[in-house]
Image: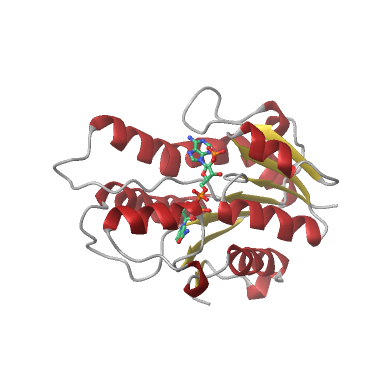
Amino acid sequence: MRTAVVTGATGGIGSAVVAALVGRGHRVVALGRDADRLARLARDGVTPVAHDLRRGRAAPPEVLELERLDALVHCAGVAPVASVAGTTAETWDEVLGTNLVGPARLTAAALPALRAAQGAVVLVGMAPGLQDVPRWSAYAGSKAALRELAGSLRAEEPLLRVALVNPGGTATPLLARVRHELGRPYDPATALSPAAVAEAVADLLDSPAAGWRDVVDVLG
Ligand SMILES: NC(=O)c1ccc[n+]([C@@H]2O[C@H](COP(=O)([O-])OP(=O)(O)OC[C@H]3O[C@@H](n4cnc5c(N)ncnc54)[C@H](OP(=O)(O)O)[C@@H]3O)[C@@H](O)[C@H]2O)c1
C-alpha cells in the first residue's frame, strides 16, 4: 500500500486531498493543528497528527519513522492581506514560516523515506497568473519562493518527482477570508471545488513517469 503525508489536512484543499488519496488506496499521515478538525479526519487509512510547521521539530515522529514515503503533499498555507507598509515582522515570520520554511524543513526530514520509495513531492502554490497584487506581498513572495524550492529540489533529487500545483480560486475558508479582506465578492458556487483540486493532485500521483508534469495549473 502506498503511503502519503499531507500537510494542511485540516483545511479545505488538504482535507479533500486526504479523502482523494485514501479513496485511491493510500495510507495517509494527515498533518494539521486544529484538534477538532484533526479528530474528524480519523478513519481507516488515515492517521491524524498534530504538527505546527512553524514550531518545534521539522517533522513529527509519525513521519520520521516512515521507511518509505510515496508522496508528500504540502497543502498548509496562510494568506494574510496587508500592504508592504503594513506587514509586520511577525506577519512576515508567520507567512514565510508556514508557506516556505516549514515545508522545506519537513521535506528535508522526509527525504530518506522519499528516496527509498522514489516518491513524489507536491507543493500547492498560488492561483496561476496572479502578479503584482497589491496588499499581498508576503503571500505572493512566499509562493514565488516555494516555486524556487520546488525547482532546486527537482534538480538536487533525481530519484524524486517534484511538482508545483497551482489552483485557481477554490472554495475554502482561506479564499473567503482573502476576498473579504480585499473587499471583493466571494461566491463558493463560482469557485473551484476543493475536490477538483484534490483529484488533480491524485491524478498526478497516479500518472506513469512519462505523464508527470512539473507544473499543474488547476483552472476548473
Ligand atoms: N483556496 C484558494 O483559492 C487557493 C488558491 C491557490 C492556492 N491555495 C493554496 O492552497 C493551500 C491550502 O489552502 P486552503 O484554501 O485549503 O486553506 P485553508 O482551508 O485555510 O487551510 C489552510 C491549512 O493550513 C494549515 N496551517 C496553517 N498554518 C499552519 C501551521 N503553522 N502549521 C501547520 N499547519 C498550518 C491549517 O491548519 P489548522 O487549521 O489546523 O491550523 C489548514 O489545514 C494553501 O497553501 C493556499 O495558499 C489556495
Figure check: 30 above or below 131: above
| Of residues 206 and 194, the one drawn nearer to the viewer in this rendering | 194
Q: Residue furthest top?
A: 56
| Of residues 206 and 48, the one drawn nearer to the viewer in this rendering | 48
Figure check: 39 above or below 153: above
Name which residue lies at 65% across and 57% down: 16
| Left/right of residue 207 with respect to residue 25 in the rendered view | left
| Left/right of residue 28 with respect to residue 168 in the rendered view | right
| Left/right of residue 24 with respect to residue 125 in the rendered view | right
Residue 169 position within the rendered picture, expressed as x and y whole percent measured from the top left: 44, 66
Residue 154 position within the rendered picture, expressed as x and y whole percent measured from the top left: 51, 56
| Of residues 176 and 3, the one drawn nearer to the viewer in this rendering | 176
Figure check: 62 above or below 163: above
Name which residue lies at 57% across and 48% down: 11
Figure check: 44 above or below 34: below
When asked about the image quadrant of residue 193, the answer is bottom right
Name which residue lies at 33% across and 46% down: 80
